[in-house]
Image: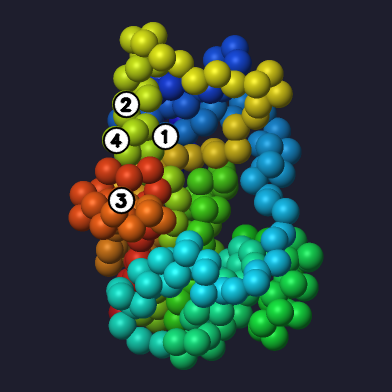
Amino acid sequence: MKCRLCGSQWLNLLYFQGDKHQFSFYECSKCGLVNLDLAHLRIAEHQAKYTDALKPIKDYNKEIGAITSYGFVQKYVPFRGSYLDIGCGNGALLHFARQDGWQVKGLEILPQYARYVRDTLNVEVDVADFLDYDKANGQYDLVSLRHVLEHLPDSVLALETINALLKKGGYAHFEFPNIQSISHRFQRFLARYKLAEKHYKPDYRPGHCNEFSKQSFIYLLQQTGFELVRWETYSHKPLSNFLYNRWHIGTKARAIVRKIDKT
């Protein structure tokens, strides 16, 4: 098995998942990516459990997740322009971006989500897998990809696709789990010394192909033509969020990156 990010064969077993420890995650010694061993797994069939039932929005101003996400974008992207939200879900982030002056568009793989956003917000939403989306020329100033990257086996292809969607000097906004959070490290410590172990149902199947830390994410950016503007961890709880923004030990990470101009 080779690392799916850098190709190194120097992988160390980091932890198991599954009721029989049948799903193995290996950490790359070179780039830091944590790779799920995909051999004999039909990983695409594992992703359905991450598709939540669409919940109609009564008041977008109570969507705390979208409020904090857009606040992060607002703080670190220095202009307004054209914006594409990949996996736009219920459209909450599009709602706040449009209010702030962005020209917004959504991309959804689920037709019912796309229809809901069109009907509710009167926002254009295309139904497509973004890896197959028309990217012949960059046309967006900002692209968001939230809690999708960890589900994709080929993270390099994902970032190259986003790079192609962006205009010169454009920005991208990512959110994903932080595999090196203090709680994940503690859980691995307990499991390693058999002090406590998470129990899985017999039908459990993992959906995350790759788990990122700041180290592996920066490596990915360097391979795909981006530079890091801001990395932080976050929480939807105000006090925890205040702490995690400053000490990057939280379980969820977010980043703003900029497309490197090629002269």
Structural distance between the alpha carbons of marks 1 and 2? 16 Å
Above-or-below relation of 255 to 119: above
* Residue 244 x, y percent position in the rendering: 27, 51
* Residue 154 x, y percent position in the rendering: 54, 47
Do the residues under discs 4 and 1 have CB atoms within 8 angstroms? no
Do the residues under discs 2 and 3 have CB atoms within 8 angstroms? no
* Residue 250 image-quadrant placement: top left
Q: Residues within 10 Å of mark 3 (few under 14, many from 20)?
A: few
Say which residue label 2 marks: 186
Do the residues under discs 1 and 3 have CB atoms within 8 angstroms? no
| Number of numbered markers | 4
Say which residue label 3 marks: 240
Give the amino acid type for the residue marked by disc 2 in the picture. Answer: Phe
* Residue 60 image-quadrant placement: bottom right
Structural distance between the alpha carbons of marks 2 and 3? 18 Å
Give the amino acid type for the residue marked by disc 1 in the picture. Answer: Val
Structural distance between the alpha carbons of marks 1 and 3? 25 Å
* Residue 54 image-quadrant placement: bottom right
Do the residues under discs 4 and 2 have CB atoms within 8 angstroms? yes
Structural distance between the alpha carbons of marks 3 and 4? 13 Å
Q: Secondary structure at mark 1?
A: strand
Q: Is residue 57 left or right of residue 246?
A: right
The label nearer to you, 3 versus 4, is 3
Say which residue label 1 marks: 34
Give the amino acid type for the residue marked by disc 4 in the picture. Answer: Ile
Report the residue that reaches farthest toward the left: 246
| Residue 7 visible, this orientation | no
Say which of 148 and 158 sits in front. 148
Structural distance between the alpha carbons of marks 4 and 1? 16 Å
